[in-house]
Amino acid sequence: MSKVVLASLIVAGASALQMPTSRAASSRVSPVADAAAKLGRRGMLAGVASALIAAPALAEYTLPDLPYDYEALEPYIDAATMRFHHDKHHATYVANVNKALEGKPAKSILELQKDAISAGGAVRNSGGGHYNHALFWEEMGPATGKGPTGALAAKIDEAFGSFDKFKEEFSAKSAGRFGSGWCWLGVKPDGKLAIDTTPNQDNPLMDGGCETKMVPILGLDVWEHAYYLKYQNRRPEYISSWFNVVNWEKVAFNYEKYASKGQGVPF
Amino acid sequence: MLPAMRRFSTAAKYTLPDLPYDVGALEPAISAEIMTIHHAKHHNTYVTNLNAALDKYADAEAKRDVAAMVALQGAIKFNGGGHVNHSIFWTNLAPTASGGGDASHAPSVVGMIEKQWGSLDAFKTSFNAQTAAIQGSGWGWLGYDAASSSLKVATCANQDPLSMCGLVPLLGIDVWEHAYYLQYKNVRPDYLKAVWSVVNWKNVEERLAHAKPK
């Protein structure tokens, strides 16, 4: 069977499983392209093709929907920031990485990270930007007052002494990252947790991306666009507010399912 | 020499320069809100942190703690660069009423620009493209290269001063998001288009005159 026909069958099958979404505005290219982007994850699906569709460019990434409404993280992160951050900044990263990879073989956005620095240009800046923001939306949620539990909580205590001490170190490093960048909590090759920062849209998944080699499970965007509308220059206030909207259940899930096994969180 | 005489003087505190115009004077290109926060908060913080870092550096020097001196280099570079850059920036801008945006005040600069880029518009297009493309935080600069007696466009990351590239700063445009976000949001190119209307060409001309060999 030709590659094109096979790809079309897989895509048609994957499309049939697409759940409609009704969340915050997304610029989904098309269910076909979207399904193609998820090819790696869904694997080979022996769907029945209702119509043969020309195989789309497999390098298309799509802007994920926010898992909540724009207002859901108020008052800690304001709705206007969520709108611009997701609908403009993240959308631009997606558009730019798609542009940069036109015609090139598809990799999941997770797989793209490893060699992003050597690839350079938009693959590094926008491919990194796309991954980082995909993780960012997923790891946050409406404030619940709940902290980490279970295995992750134990690992946090082991690495930092206590959850409070973890927050102290994470806050200090986030505030101390000069210019644009991110602060990360990740799992090192030895299984221990660590905190480190990266500049611009680099992340610890990239070879050469971070001084500490680790799989990130939690990231804080400290680019000014992440907080300026509400906090202006008051980055430390943004950082301490942000802890209120960390979805520790999701972070723990990603830790247990992926990072604790040395795998990056996939999107 | 007595040890006391070898102490680094802690008298040299840096201070926030006043803006040469009202916070609202650069509207509509740059809003009063941005000018207020940019000057009174961001630049002020660089000055405060520079002074703090230099105090700590003086202590480290007195103790001959070279490791501590090295550890402070980052803070001095960030905050010192921030102070240098913003001090230049406020003088590089002027209200249109005072000649902001009027390149006829800079005949020598414009003459060199036309020779090197063909036209002032071509220069602005090139400058804006390079400056818009800066990843993350940084500055776009027009600088004077003494070695070649020519003008150069350069970009610097974070608060790295242009002197690190061996150029004399003539005109800098801050593209840290704090410089434009409240007004232009993610659309950095719109800010770059607008800012030319408040460029203080008189100041750019003065800086060139100062930079060229007598």
Image (cartoon, coloured by chain):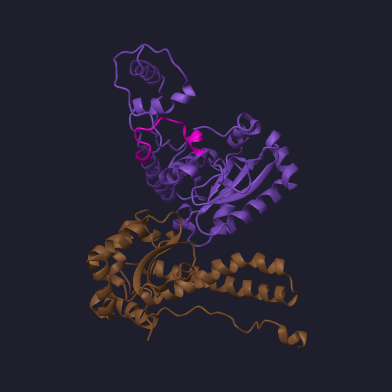
The boundaries of the magenta stretch are A99-113
Q: Nearer the viewer, residue A180 or B123?
A: B123
- Chain rendered brown: B
Q: Position of residue B173 (x, y in %)?
A: 38, 67
Q: Nearer the viewer, residue A248 or A34?
A: A34
Q: Nearer the viewer, residue A36 or A229?
A: A36
Residue A222 visible in the picture: no
Q: Is residue A56 above or below residue A135?
A: above
Label total for image: 0
Q: Nearer the viewer, residue A47 or A207?
A: A207
Q: Is residue A150 above or below residue B61?
A: above
Q: Is residue A101 magenta?
A: yes
Is the N terminus of chain A in the top left, top right, bottom left or bottom right quadrant? top left
Q: Residue at x 39, y 49 (%)?
A: A84
- Chain rendered purple: A
Q: Is residue B36 magenta?
A: no
Residue A104 visible in the picture: yes
Q: Is residue A30 left or right of residue A173?
A: left
Q: Farthest residue toward the right?
A: B2
Q: Residue at x 59, y 59 (%)?
A: A176
Q: Is residue B9 above or below residue A22?
A: below
Q: Position of residue B93 (x, y in %)?
A: 35, 74
Q: Is residue A238 above or below residue B113?
A: above
Q: Residue at x 34, y 35 (%)?
A: A102
Q: Farthest residue toward the front?
A: B148
State the image quarter where residue B97 is shown. bottom left
State the image quarter where residue A5 is shown. top left
